[in-house]
Amino acid sequence: MRIAAIADIHLGEDSGGRLRPAFEELGECADVLLVAGDLTRHGSLAEAGVVARELTGLPVPVLAVLGNHDHHSDAGDEITALLEDHGVRVLEGDAVTVDVGGRRLGVAGVKGFGGGFAGACASEFGEREMKDFVGHTAASADRLRGALKEVGDADVRVAMTHYAPIPETLAGEPEQIYPFLGSYLFGEVIDEAGVDLAVHGHAHFGSEKGNTPAGVPVRNVAQPIIRTAFATYVLPETG
């Protein structure tokens, strides 16, 4: 199966047509397009309208999660509804199964959140604000766990988040901000489920490739990293 993926496209009201020509060629090289968050610059409905027009009517199914930028204007629910009205399936603790040539591709998605990684992570202790921060991450990881159970015995399973599940794909970012770029909790859930691929965005100065402790390939598909309209991964991987 050919998985096209992109994140952090950050479209503004002046971005119409920027990616559409490349997206219209997806049918020749991919079976599905995954958009791993930060579709907009400031999370406005006007910006989301531009995103919707870029993504509607493409030759492959389009699945997405929202990112932190998409929530900036507190319009996440409205953006989700707008995108889904244009045929983009937005995942937040749920999953979709797509038929690809008689085989089943299962994609589970959640925005995710921060918290850090082994040896330098936040704990659910102390002030209510810290408990809420870590509790939000734990709840998000639980939603991903439930979504991965939904895909069941799909032939190929992919986990999509905006925040990073491992620190390796953050290499290049200042280590001081790792806790705000992802959490090990998502990596644990991905390893529990044993998926075939995990994709995320958010880290503009990170690295494209990494693996979970159990060996699941993780790809940072933020556009500043892949430097193209989308990256394509063929599953199962060979070689």
Image (cartoon, rainbow, N blue to C red):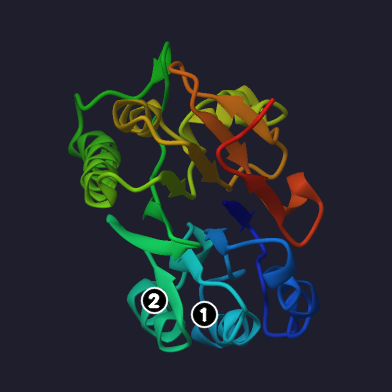
At x 59%, y 53%, the residue is: 3
Q: Secondary structure at mark 1?
A: loop
- Sort mark 2 into few (<14), some (14-19) or many (20+) by Cα contacts within 10 Å: many
Looking at the image, which is closer to me, 179 or 225?
225
Residue ID at (53%, 62%): 69
Q: 36 left or right of 169?
A: left
Q: For the residue marked with disc 1, what is the amino acid?
A: Ser
Above or below 126: residue 72:
below
Would residue 129 be visible to someone looking at this image?
yes
Q: Could you tell whether 11 is left or right of 43 in the image?
A: right
Judging by the rendered image, the residue that carries numbered circle 2 is 80
Q: Quadrant of residue 131?
A: top left
* Viewer-side residue, 149 vs 45: 149
Image position, residue 164 (x, y; %): 50, 37
What residue type is disc 2 on? Thr
* Circle 1 crowding by C-alpha within 10 Å: few under 14, some 14–19, many from 20: many
Snapshot quadrant of residue 52: bottom right
**Mark 2 against mark 1, which lies toward the viewer?**
2
Mark 1, residue position: 44
Of mark 2 and mark 1, the one earlier in the sequence is 1
